[in-house]
Image (cartoon, rainbow, N blue to C red):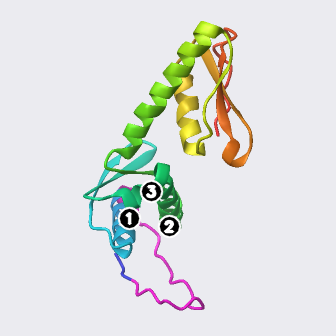
Amino acid sequence: MTNFEISRSYDTPVPHIPQASTELNQAQIALDELSQILEKMGIKAQVFYQELRDEILLEIRGNNLGLVIGKHGQTLDALEFILNVVHRKRCPTAKQLILDAQGYREKKRVILKKMLYNARDAVVSTNDEVPLDPMSAADRKVIHLLCRSLTEVKSESRGDGKDRRIIILPSDGNIEEETVVN
């Protein structure tokens, strides 16, 4: 991997980033990119990866990773976005990178799943819709995907911006109905 010296001047042209030679080394390139970002942030941690069919999971492990995770995972989401942008510059056919820190995403998924099941139970008992609190697009996507496996209810997104939320509704029996995912 070629190293570049980063200049602090804003008028310095961006150095050419060499393209990845094969898809086989995408995970290693992503690992190196993330390690460099963490180093520049002053964070000492280990980074592990797991290659799946359509994505590469990158797991950051270490102490005091609250700075990496941020409030409600916002910093982790932003870091994942930046990492994907940087990675696609080097690997135009790159797989999606999924970033996690100390299992935060799985813990969050468990919390969202419990929230969905509680809402489902309320919808089933009252036959009325239940609004969930506003949440990030990533969290809404998780809820929508989890809701697909439930036959009693369906999900729908309503609202705009920071007020966008999911509404859990009674299913009308049409299992093929598509939920809004965003």
Per the picture, the main secondary structure of the magenta-coloured stretch is loop
Which one is earlier in the sequence, the residue at label 1 or at label 3? Answer: 1
Q: Residue at x 63, y 13 (%)?
A: 175
Q: Quadrant of residue 171?
A: top right
Amino acid on which the number 3 mark rests in the picture: Gly
Q: Residue at x 60, y 91 (%)?
A: 11
The image shows residue 173 at horizontal and vertical percentages of: 66, 8
The image shows residue 37 at horizontal and vertical percentages of: 40, 70
Q: Quadrant of residue 159?
A: top right
State which region is magenta. 4-26
The crowding category of the residue bearing disc 3, from other C-alpha atoms within 10 Å (few below 14, some 14 to 19, many at least 20), is: few
The image shows residue 103 at horizontal and vertical percentages of: 33, 44
Front label number (1 vs 2): 1
| Element carrying mark 3 | loop
- Determine which residue is flagged by label 1: 34
- Determine which residue is flagged by label 2: 86
Q: Is residue 95 visible?
A: no
The crowding category of the residue bearing disc 1, from other C-alpha atoms within 10 Å (few below 14, some 14 to 19, many at least 20), is: many
Q: Which mark is residue 96?
A: none
- Determine which residue is flagged by label 3: 70
Image quadrant where one finds the N terminus = bottom left
Q: Residue furthest right?
A: 159
